[in-house]
Image: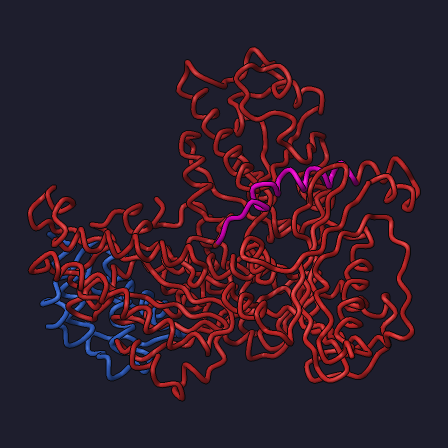
Chain colours: A blue, B red
Amino acid sequence: MSSAEILNELREIMIDVFDVDDLEVTPATTAEDVEEWDSLSHVRLVVAVERKFKIKFKNSEIEALKSVGDLVNLIEAKTAA
Amino acid sequence: MLSDLAWLPAPSADFRERLRALRAEAAQPGEAYYERVLTLATAALDENQLGQLARLAGSVAEGGAAPAQFGRVKLGVVGDGTLSLLAPVIAGSGLRHGLLVDVVEGAYGSAVQQAMDTSGPLHRAGLDMLLVASDVRALGLSRAADSLADAEARVAGALAQLKMVVDGFRPSVGAAILVQTVPPPIEPLFGSFDRVEPTSSYAMVTAFNARLAAWASEGQVVLLDIARLAETIGLERWDAPRHWHASKLPFAPEMAPVYGDVVARTVAALRGRAKKCLVLYLDNTLWGGVIGDDGVAGIQLGQGSAAGEAFLAIQQTALELRRRGVVLAVCSKNEEAAALLPFREHPEMVLKEDHIAVFQANWTDKAANLRAIAETLNIGIDALVFLDDNPAERAQVRRELPVVAVPELPDEPALYPRLLMAAGYFEAVAFTQDDRDRAAMYQANAARAAAVQASGDLDSYLASLDMVCTIRPVDAVSRPRVAQLINKSNQFNLTTRRYTEAQVEAAERDPDRHLAQIRLVDRFGDNGIICVLIGERRGDALEIDTWLMSCRVLGRRVQEAALDHLVRVARTAGARQLVGRYIPSPKNAMVAGHYASLGFAPAGEEPGGTTVWTLDLADYTSPELPMVIDDTAVGAPTPELQA
């Protein structure tokens, strides 16, 4: 899966997790940019991503994430392995 | 399988579109709104979808025009760890059980402080119920004790901590307080010896859970067996240390949907919304094969084949449910004669004709048959569960009758009992002798319905029943059933006031209050306790705080016997009038005219549509009733009036 495809999947997941009608997501998007993205919905986002891509994250990996781009890269690395 | 809510169908592909449509209508619900919400919620949803449903529930409740079928519960949630993930999941799961659950979440990790702060927000919220979600780590049971005395002190301390929370909140909670058992730790300290060694965390948790169960058996709290749930799913999948460390989530977030459903179904059971009747399809559900084609000798049932044994196990499960009071019925597409053959002639049949209260075998559509079953038993159609092996038929029944529970079943009949039971349709929070006898009672009722049809004339029919109506005070033996009726009766319930067993006991001792329970026996059997009355002396009146009856004795003139009792009580107490109230609820419209039909005069209205009624005792004369009245509950005259 290309990083563009992953980003698109991720957008769908985020719409569901944050319960919004639409969402603009770029690799530069951070939690600051999305009102519904707080520490709690972040947990749900991680769980939903793990379920969708059938991968598991380590806490250290999650803590190191700064932006959507970081998450896309992490998913890409994990799904490629 | 169970953690995925496998007894529920997959969510519809257009879940979001349907949700959006329902949200748009929340303030002004359109046609069949309740059914559409139920259909949307009756699916194996994930935690995000449940959260979306929680928002819908909130909008419907706030919209102020919620359809009457919805029940409403204000549920406080306090406990250890992060609860914010659980609150929306509970509210979303509530919709599946027809409930608008307003979850009031406690602050993070401070249950004891909030319990003690009697002016705090949770105390002022007007809670109906409270859930105390304990975690092993906060209870101090997750690490081994230093000594036997230390282990004992820690178990006792954990229990005392929980009791402090429960006792602190008790005065502010209307109905029930739910407490949770604690899943045992996974990591062994010694190994198998953990179970032998009382200082191990495993042994302490086991002891704690046992004491919790003993406490719940006294009727003071309702037990939510989360330990069993976690073990059923697998402790390894349940426990997620990385989420505890990162966010203090008490268990793996993927388990939230099943947890939410278990909480919601228990709340629903407390509100009298548990299912009452299991309707069984026959071919390939109770036996393998098609009786009309294969004949009695050709169907698979009984020892000797794997399939035959699997169908036997399904029948045994159904029979076990009947023994605990679940009514059994049959709904089958068959000639009746053919459908009855195995019940009469197959030597391996565990279920007999006698066990089936209503037998519908014909070529009419299943929805019509299910309606007929509910009508014959005089229960709501929403009290039915329909077990059917055929996926297309299941989908059709769900579409036509969204309020009937229809569990999804795997292709393997050996797993039918597991799915049926894991769904928790028949969740109970207490068990009494009356429950044990209930299936037989409903069956006798169906026989009575047949008898009244045969006799044609109601008065001669009632006289032929040889009814004995026994009126007694509430005591320790009858109290659990009385409390159960108070908390479960919805339809014939004038005020729908809910009291715990402890509150009932307190009322028994209150000289200003009068409690009575009425049993009815007739020639078809003992109906058990079918009426609860609570009166309260106020000035020159006896006010009827609670008047509820079981719908199974409707049309038997028991309400007149109950009124006659209340009049005797009022006269003995020196009162001059009876005052009754009808407080409308979504389910009690059938008794709106109750007091008028008994000769009470209207005496005004109160906010919320409550109507007040009075009966002047001077105008009352006792009716001739077609039953023997045995009343020892009137009590002695009050001293000041004997002069």
Examine the structure image and report whether residue B444 is included in the region drawn in magenta. Answer: yes
Query: In percent of the image, x 24 and y 79: which residue is there?
Result: A31
Q: Residue A28, position in %: x, y?
A: 19, 78
* Residue stretch in magenta: B430-448
- Name the spot of residue B446 as percent of width and height, x first: 74, 39
Q: Residue at x 19, y 55 (%)?
A: B204
In the figure, B151 relative to B283: above or below? below
Q: Nearer the viewer, residue B315 or A61?
A: B315
Look at the picture and state if B234 lies above or below B121: above
Q: From this viewpoint, which residue is outermost toward the top?
A: B297
**Res. B45 visible in picture:** no
Chief secondary structure of the magenta portion: helix
Residue B634 spot, x, y in % from top left? 73, 64
Where residue B337 appears, x then y in whole percent? 71, 20
Residue A74 colored in magenta in the image: no
Q: What residue is at 40 percent from the left and 34 percent from the top?
A: B415
In this picture, residue B91 sits left or right of residue B164: right
In front of the other: B314 or B224: B224
Q: Quadrant of residue B142?
A: bottom left
Asked if residue B294 lies left or right of residue B31, the reply is left
Up/down of B24 relative to B298, above or below: below
Q: Is residue B244 left or right of residue B266?
A: left
Q: Is residue B301 left or right of residue B162?
A: right
What is the quadrant of residue B222 in the picture? Answer: bottom left
